[in-house]
Amino acid sequence: MGERGGRRVLEISIDPDLCIGSGDCTRVAPSAFGLDEDRGVSIVRPDAGHVEAALLLRAARGCPTQAIRVRLAEVEESGGDRRVDTSSPR
Ligand code: SF4
């Protein structure tokens, strides 16, 4: 529960223009990230939001190009979305 009754969720994204396909993130958090061999970039797996936040942040901080963003978002019960914090290393 958030401070105003919302639910906090992690939003994870990868900027494909920054990703160089090094695979570091897939080694740190294989449940959250996978390599798209065709495009040569990493992708966020569907269950990434269930991965431990500390592991996601370690992967983000270890990304050589800082392509990974991890945000804490607050989802209101009405379905609205309001960002309350940015936990990305950028
Ligand atoms: S660590 Fe960064 S650059 Fe390497 S594959 Fe993951 S997102 Fe791409």
Image (cartoon, rainbow, N blue to C red):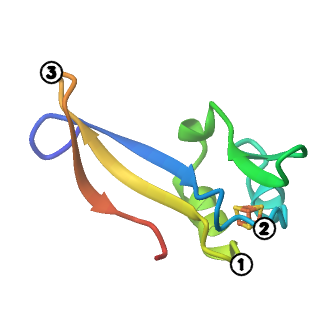
Could you tell me the amino acid type at mark 2? Ile
| Residue nearest the viewer, comparing 74 with 16 | 16
Q: Are marks 1 and 2 in contact (CB under 8 Å)?
A: yes
| Residue nearest the viewer, comparing 16 with 85 | 16
The residue furthest top is 78
Which label is found at residue 6? none
Q: Label 2, on which residue?
A: 20
Q: Is mark 2 within 8 Å of ligand 1?
A: yes
Mark 1, other Cα within 10 Å: few <14 / some 14–19 / many ≥20 = some
Could you tell me the amino acid type at mark 3? Ser
Could you tell me the amino acid type at mark 1? Pro
Mark 2 or mark 1, which is nearer the start of the sequence?
Answer: 2
Q: Label 3, on which residue?
A: 78
| SS at circle 1 | loop
Disc 1 or disc 3, which is closer to the eye? 1
Name the residue rendered at 63%, 58% in the picture. Answer: 55
Mark 3 or mark 2, which is nearer the start of the sequence?
Answer: 2
Structural distance between the alpha carbons of marks 1 and 3 = 38 Å
- Give how far across and how far down residue 6 sits, in percent: 19, 35
Q: Are marks 1 and 3 in contact (CB under 8 Å)?
A: no
Q: Label 1, on which residue?
A: 64
- Give how far across and how far down residue 73 sits, in percent: 31, 47
| SS at circle 2 | loop
Name the residue rendered at 68%, 37% in the picture. Answer: 45
